[in-house]
Image (tube, rainbow, N blue to C red):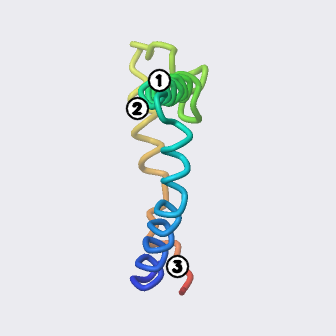
Amino acid sequence: MNTPSIVLSSLLGLALVLLIAPSVIAMNRGKTLRNIALWLAIVFALGLVYQNFGPERSPLSSLPATQNGDASDDQQMDQTATPIEDQNYTPPRE
């Protein structure tokens, strides 16, 4: 994204907040603290679910590492990997 689009997106977001905020505040009069606590609980629960069952979590990642000298396999994998410079990769232009 370039700078003008970021500025225009920010102005659009601010305009939406200014248009919607008075009605939302009037609707939540007297229940604001309860709603804040409810949303914090929802976000906290989603964070825990993501942390425990997210995409970086796999059944094998919770297994303990073996102690029988498997470090040589890791070194062999590092030596056989092809560096990115050798692949002649050129990123797409915008």
User: Secondary structure under badge 3?
Assistant: loop
In the image, residue 1 lies at what x, y percent? 47, 78
Q: Horizontally, is 20 left or right of 64 in the view?
A: right
At label 2, the amino acid type is Ser
Q: Position of residue 22 (x, y in %)?
A: 49, 53
Among the two numbered marks 2 and 1 on one chain, the one whose residue lies closer to the N terminus: 1
The disc, 2 or 3, on the residue closer to the chain's N-terminal end is: 2
| Residue 60: quarter of image | top right
Q: Residue at x 51, y 14 (%)?
A: 63
At label 3, which amino acid type do we have?
Answer: Pro
Mark 2 residue crowding within 10 angstroms, few (<14) / some (14–19) / many (20+): few
CA distance separating discs 3 and 1: 49 Å
Quadrant in which the C terminus appears? bottom right
* Front label number (2 vs 3): 3
Please report whichever mark, 3 or 1, sits nearer to the chain's N-terminal start. 1
Q: Which residue is mark 1?
A: 34
Where residue 43 sits in the image (x, y, percent)?
50, 30
Foreground pick, 26 / 38: 26
| Residue indicated by mark 2 | 72
* Left or right: 67, with 91 as reference point: left
**Of marks 3 and 1, the one in the foreground:** 1
Tell me the distance, in whole angstroms, between the alpha carbons under discs 2 and 1.
Answer: 57 Å
Q: Residue at x 39, y 39 (%)?
A: 75
Query: What residue is disc 3 on?
Result: 91
Q: Secondary structure at mark 2?
A: helix
Q: Which mark is residue 62?
A: none
Give yes or no for contact between labels 2 and 1 (Cβ–Cβ under 8 Å). no
Vertical placement of residue 88 versus 54, above or below:
below
Q: CA distance from mark 2 to mark 3?
A: 34 Å
How many C-alpha atoms fall within 10 Å of the one at disc 1: few (<14), some, or many (≥20)? few
Q: Which residue is painted at 39% across and 20% down in the image? A: 69
